[in-house]
Amino acid sequence: MKKVHIHTFGGAIAGNKAPPSPTSRPWDLCLNVMHLKDPHDSGLKPETQKIFLGLNVEAVEFISSFADFTVRGVLEEFDEAAVAINCWCGWARSVSLAEILASYWRESGLEVDVVHLHHDVKPPHMYESELIGD
């Protein structure tokens, strides 16, 4: 069975450096979603994923289509694909998008492994909007 690895991380926590790929190759796709609107709640909650999608409908549709195109192309040649997604803290946007993509790919018959590297790390005391403006 073909497999997709999705890892999320917080750019502010990881110094904007993606973690090592879980495959023997570099990441097949790296997505930075810091620019998307932030639901400011755990992306593991289905209601937060709906809010995230509602705040970013066109962007999520575009990113999802591009990610699907890229991953399916990789899976034509390899048995697994690796996707890294980051936002500011690795808590809301990246996690929401990862869960949305994982659900879609599972429904289409792919095996999906999701790792949220910084979801359990306490976010910085200041929101990104206080640091860089809204």
Image (cartoon, rainbow, N blue to C red):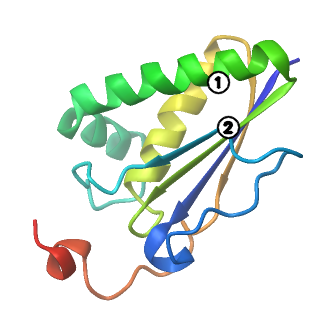
What residue sits 43% from the left and 70% below the top?
89
The structure residue drawn at horizontal position 20% and vertical position 81%, both measured from the top left corner, is: 131
Q: Is residue 83 above or below residue 131?
A: above
Which of the numbered marks, if any, corresponds to residue 92?
none
Q: Earlier in the sequence, mark 2 or mark 1?
A: 2
Q: Is residue 46 above or below residue 11?
A: above
Q: Amino acid at mark 1?
A: Val
Q: Is residue 3 left or right of residue 52?
A: right
Circle 1 residue: 71
- Horizontal and vertical percent for residue 133? 11, 72
- Amino acid at pointer 2: Asp
The tag on residue 28 is: 2
Near-viewer residue (134 or 28): 28
CB within 8 Å, label 2 to label 1:
yes
For the residue pair 50 and 108, the one nearer the viewer reads as 108
- Residue 31 lies left or right of residue 114; in this view the side is left
Relative height, residue 13 to residue 2 (above, below): below
Q: Nearer the viewer, residue 88 or 114?
A: 88
Residue 41 x, y percent position in the rendering: 33, 60
Residue at 34% from the left image edge and 41% from the top image edge:
47
